[in-house]
Image (spheres, rainbow, N blue to C red):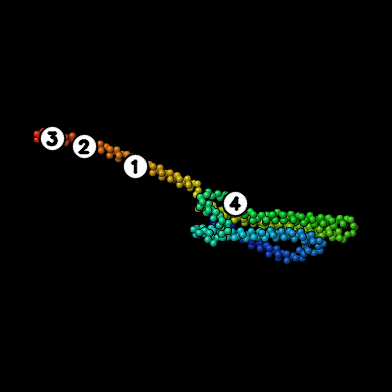
Amino acid sequence: MDNINFHRHYSRNTLLRLVALVVVAAALVYWKWDLVNEIYFKDQLTRLGWVINGAIVALFLVGMLRVALSLAGYAREETALLRFVRNLNKRPEDPLKGVPRRSLIAQRYRTLLALHETHTPINQNALASTLVAAESTRSSLAKYINNILILLGVFGTIVSLSIALIGASDVLENAISASGMGMVIHGMSTALSTTITAIVCYVFFGYFYLRLNDAQTNLVSGIEQVTTAHLMPKFQVQTDTVLYEFTGLIRSLQSLVAEMGNTQKSFRETEQHILDTLEQHRDKVARLEAHMGDITRLLRIGFRLRDDE
């Protein structure tokens, strides 16, 4: 992993930071409970503030639960990726040993293995795009909550100010109206509480939503780097390598053809030499036959033999 730009245990550290901030927030609320009670619960003329603040907090808790679950999943994926790379270095014959079967890196390895066995060209860009599209669905709910969380605070503020305006109209209609003045104060207090709730929840949730996106980017980047550095050279033959090997093969064939040409030339020379030798042999045999005829004729003459003897 030294040659790969990958933050180890990024998601786990984010989860620990989330737990630490929750503990700090709970301690702060406990310490300032009188102030919290004064703003949110004391002397509330209507339940509007509780409803709006409750909706904001409920939406915030749902989003934080989704973020925490996603971070826990990414923490497991990071552990699986680290184990996979360790297996590649120590036991390359079984890189999936101890790696969860449903982890992203295990799925990527099996996909590349299947493409390699079927002799299918591997397009890493398509695989990366598919992975990013699949992982974006994990954070869709968190993204939605992050977008509407502050809008709920604005909605609560507007509704609370409307209540305050209703109370102000009662004050204007009646010279002395305790209920109207109380409604004005209640509306302003509710507007303040909903605004504070929305801002605090949005800041808290927005930070961890960004950390979730960073964890997702870190994991996808790590998988693609491992694919490029370790898996692609194993499962795909590069074009440059093929051309280089093909060029070497052509050079070998050229040298073989040259040797075959030299051998063929040697064969032709040997054949011509054999033909010349045979021609000379025929000439010698013809001359020998002529000499034998002369000798036979001389012997007949010398011994006075007839032609039939």
Residue assigned mark 1: 263
Taking depth in this image into account, of 31 and 97 the one nearest to the observer is: 97
Q: CA distance from mark 4 to mark 3?
A: 110 Å
Residue assigned mark 4: 130
Name the N-terminal-most of marks 1 and 2. 1
Q: Residue at x 89, y 56 (%)?
A: 173
SS for callout 1? helix
Q: CA distance from mark 1 to mark 4?
A: 58 Å
- Whether residue 54 is visible: yes
Q: Residue at x 15, y 34 (%)?
A: 294
Q: Is residue 130 left or right of residue 201?
A: left
Give, as a three-letter code, the residue at label 2: Val
- Whether residue 232 is visible: no
Tell which tag, 1 or 3, sits nearer the viewer: 3
- When the figure is inspected, residue 235 is found, relative to residue 298, above or below; the finding is below
Q: Which mark is residue 308?
A: 3
SS for callout 3? loop
Q: CA distance from mark 4 to mark 2?
A: 89 Å
Give, as a three-letter code, the residue at label 4: Thr
SS for callout 4? helix
Kindly indicate whether the residue at mark 3 contacts the one at mark 1 (C-beta within 8 angstroms).
Answer: no
Q: CA distance from mark 1 to mark 2?
A: 33 Å
